[in-house]
Amino acid sequence: MTDSLTFDSNVYSAGTRHPKHQHDVLHMSLVLYGRLSETVGHTTESAGPLSVVVKDPGVVHADDFLTSAKLVRVTIPAATIDALLDDPARSAPWRWTHHPVAANAFLRLAERVNKDRATSHLCDPDIVDLLAAISARPALPA
C-alpha cells in the first residue's frame, strides 16, 4: 500500500446530482460550505459545513447538492479504512462524522498542504488525528 496522499477540491452548483457511482480509491472529504445528501443503499446522510466523510473504494453512492457547496478531498490510493485502523470493528466502509475534532484535523492538514504545496503521508499527525476522530468510540461510563 502506498502512503502518499493527494488533495483536491471541487465546487458544486445547487441542484447538482451525481447518480450512483463508485471510486477506486479511499476518499476522505470535508464540506467547507454548503449542504448535500449522500445515499448508500437505503441510508441517506445529510451533511453541511465541517462534516467529514470517509468512503472506501467500491462504495456505491449517490450525491445531491442541495445548495452550492465546496468540498476538499484527501485521496489515498490502494487503501481501505480497515487497513488504516488498529481495530477493524471501528471501520465502516462509509461513514460521515459531524464532530469538530475530525474537521479541525482535516482543516489543519489541508491548510498546511495548500500553503506549503507539500505532500503528506499516512504518518502525518493530522491524518492520525483525523482517523482517530472518525473511528473513535464513545467513552464507556466508569
Image: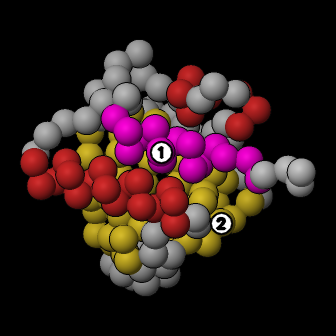
Instruction: Identify the image quadrant of the N terminus.
Output: top left
Q: Can residue 56 be seen in this view?
A: yes
- Residue 5 part of the magenta-drawn span: no
Residue displayed at 25% across by 35% down: 120
Residue receiving disc 2: 45
Q: Residue 20 carries which label?
A: none
Q: Which mark is residue 129?
A: 1
Label 1 to label 2: alpha-carbon separation: 23 Å
Residue displayed at 34% across by 35% down: 124
Q: Earlier in the sequence, mark 1 or mark 2?
A: 2
SS class, disc 1 = helix
* Horizontal arrangement in the rendering, residue 57 relative to residue 16 (left or right): right
Range drawn in magenta: 124-138
Q: How many marks?
A: 2
Q: Examine the rendered structure and indicate whether residue 33 appears above or below residue 75.
A: below
- Residue 58: image quadrant is top right
Residue 106 percent location from the top left of the image: 39, 54
What amino acid does circle 1 point to? Asp
Q: Residues within 10 Å of mark 1 (few under 14, many from 20)?
A: some
Single out the mark in the foreground, 1 or 2: 1
What amino acid does circle 2 point to? Glu
Q: Is residue 38 visible?
A: no
- Residue 141: image quadrant is bottom right
Q: Examine the rendered structure and indicate whether residue 26 appears above or below residue 72.
A: above
Residue lying furthest top in this view? 1
Residue displayed at 48% across by 47% down: 130
Residue 94 percent location from the top left of the image: 62, 46
* SS assignment for the magenta stretch, majority: helix
